[in-house]
Image: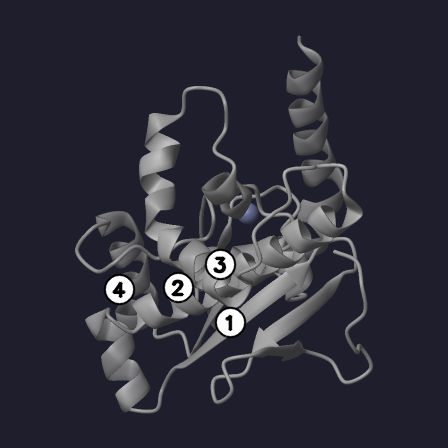
């Protein structure tokens, strides 16, 4: 058995011996009664983003849609995302949707520095986020220095990437509203859409303020600062 297979098997054993017994009643009830999640969580597939942990959610609480970049493509161009949104809003009737971007997002990075290996499908998919990169460029217009060792270049790159990550969240929030189920539910005041930017290394979430279009710390006691 390979090391990675052993890790997976050990994980299953841990689930059976530790986690399942602790949550058995809940799993049994959910199996019999079905799910009534309170939130559709749309996020990146990145292994460092843990939706249930971030939202302190247990079984049955989050309906999760993840893909590379946490993208909501323009309406009509991706039935998978549209189906998940439709199911969550029309059938499960979730009252909240979270669109969660994150720091050090490889998908956003790839918009500026495409991978050197052959990944044509990834390239096509990421084009759905291209407007976010363009918006970030227009807000942080200084050209990058040719010297990668210049500290100001690195700082500017980080600023550009963070802006693009946040612009991507805004873009996905906008595109969600192109979907009829979301538009209808918002008009009827039975749905809220939230934009989050999760800073992995700091364990902090900044939330999109719909009125200003800017991101603010989610929690009062957390007030900005450097780091990712
Ligand atoms: Zn990502």
**How far apart are the alpha carbons under marks 2 and 3?**
18 Å
For marks 4 and 3 on the same chain, the one whose residue lies earlier in the sequence? 4
Q: What residue does disc 1 label?
A: 195
- State the residue at coordinates (29%, 75%): 182
Task: Give coordinates of residue 193: x percent, y percent.
Answer: 43, 77
Q: Is residue 215 above or below residue 71?
A: below
Q: Of the residues tagged 3 and 1, which is closer to the observer?
A: 3
Foreground pick, 110 / 95:
110
Q: What residue does disc 4 label?
A: 86
**How far apart are the alpha carbons under marks 3 and 1?**
20 Å
Q: Determine the secondary structure under disc 4.
A: helix
For marks 3 and 1 on the same chain, the one whose residue lies earlier in the sequence? 3
For marks 2 and 1 on the same chain, the one whose residue lies earlier in the sequence? 2
- State the residue at coordinates (34%, 27%): 120
Q: Which mark is residue 60?
A: none
Foreground pick, 101 / 33:
101
Circle 3 crowding by C-alpha within 10 Å: few under 14, some 14–19, many from 20: some
Q: Determine the secondary structure under disc 2.
A: helix
**How far apart are the alpha carbons under marks 2 and 1?**
9 Å
**Can residue 57 be seen at all in this image of the molecule?**
no
Q: In which quarter of the image is the N terminus?
A: top right
Foreground pick, 126 / 146:
146
**How far apart are the alpha carbons under marks 4 and 2?**
15 Å
Q: Do the residues labelled 2 and 1 touch (CB within 8 Å)?
A: yes
Q: Do the residues labelled 4 and 2 touch (CB within 8 Å)?
A: no
Circle 4 crowding by C-alpha within 10 Å: few under 14, some 14–19, many from 20: some
For marks 1 and 4 on the same chain, the one whose residue lies earlier in the sequence? 4
Q: What residue does disc 2 label?
A: 172
Q: What residue does disc 3 label?
A: 137
| Mark 3 within 8 Å of ligand 1, using the beta carbon | no
């Amino acid at each position: 058995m390979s090391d990675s297979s052993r890790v997976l098997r050990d994980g299953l054993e841990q689930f059976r011996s530790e986690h399942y017994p602790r949550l058995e009643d809940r799993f049994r009830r959910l199996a019999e009664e079905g799910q009534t999640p309170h939130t559709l969580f749309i996020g990146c597939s990145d292994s460092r983003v843990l939706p249930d942990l971030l939202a302190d959610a247990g079984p049955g609480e989050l309906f999760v849609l993840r893909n590379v970049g946490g993208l909501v493509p323009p309406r009509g161009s991706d039935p998978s995302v549209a189906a998940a949104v439709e199911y969550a809003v029309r059938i499960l009737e979730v009252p909240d949707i979270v669109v969660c971007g994150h720091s050090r997002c490889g998908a956003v990075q790839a918009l500026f520095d495409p991978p050197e290996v052959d990944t044509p499908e990834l390239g096509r998919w990421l084009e759905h986020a291209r407007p976010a990169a363009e918006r970030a460029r227009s807000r942080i217009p200084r050209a990058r220095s040719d010297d990668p060792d210049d500290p100001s270049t690195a700082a500017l790159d980080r600023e550009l990437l963070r802006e693009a990550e946040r612009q991507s969240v805004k873009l996905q929030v906008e595109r969600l509203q192109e979907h009829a189920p979301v538009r209808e539910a918002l008009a009827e005041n039975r749905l809220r859409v939230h934009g989050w930017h999760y800073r992995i290394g700091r364990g902090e979430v900044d939330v999109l303020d719909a009125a200003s279009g800017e991101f603010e710390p989610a929690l009062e006691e957390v007030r900005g600062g450097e780091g990712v």
